[in-house]
Image (tube, rainbow, N blue to C red):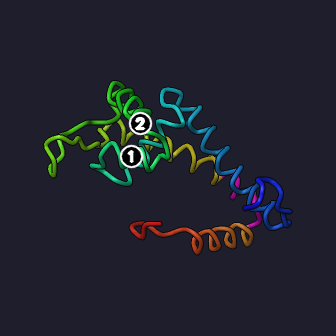
Amino acid sequence: MTELGSTPRTPADEVLLALLRLAMGVSIEAADEIGTVSAVQLRAVTLLHQRPGVNLGDLARGMGVSVSVTSRLVDRLVAAGLVDKRTSTTSGREISLWLSQLGEDALDCYDDLRLTRIRARIGNLPPEHADAVLSALGALVPGPGEGG
């Protein structure tokens, strides 16, 4: 196994890192503008939107954190009115997690803010470059309903 940071980076790697930093920056700026929902909470809300009815353990795995950390996060989301807890239809001892309408609205607002920012960046490109970027990204990421 190589040590972190020991692999030389190519110019293409640097472009990819810049793209990742741009995406992260856009997301953080949008989360900051919302103000009432943290970036971590927005990540959980996004996962719940993608997997409605998920249980606490699956949400924790999706977020890459412990169940106890996720439980506290979900408690805060429920208290804020963003998430609903329901008894699971498959197990009476388990809960399933669903976005409330307020949670859906918060996610829509977050997505709108991110789109506004990234559209502005792409809009600064010459049209042929903007078309090429969107075409390449379309080939890279799955379309709606394709998973990934």
Question: Any mark on residue 59, and which?
Answer: 1
95 shown above or below 53: above
Q: Name which residue lies at 16% across and 47% down.
A: 91
Q: Name which residue lies at 76% across and 60% down.
A: 2
Residue 122 magenta-drawn? Answer: yes
Magenta-colored span: 120-126
Residue 31 magenta-drawn? Answer: no
Q: Where is residue 121 in the image (x, y as percent from the top left)?
A: 70, 53
Image quarter where the N terminus lies is: bottom right
Toward which corner of the image does residue 145 lie, by quadrant?
Answer: bottom left
Toward which corner of the image does residue 11 lie, by quadrant?
Answer: bottom right
> Tag 1, which secondary structure?
helix
Disc 2 to disc 1: CB gap under 8 Å: yes
Question: Any mark on residue 121, and which?
Answer: none
Q: Position of residue 141 (x, y in %)?
A: 55, 68
Toward which corner of the image does residue 113 lie, by quadrant?
Answer: top right
Q: Name which residue lies at 35% across and 28% down.
A: 75
Question: 55 or 119, which lies in front?
Answer: 55
Q: In this rendering, would 134 be left or right of 64? A: right
Question: Any mark on residue 70, and which?
Answer: 2
Q: Residues within 10 Å of mark 1 (few under 14, many from 20)?
A: many
Question: 65 or 53, which lies in front?
Answer: 65
Q: Position of residue 144 (x, y in %)?
A: 42, 66
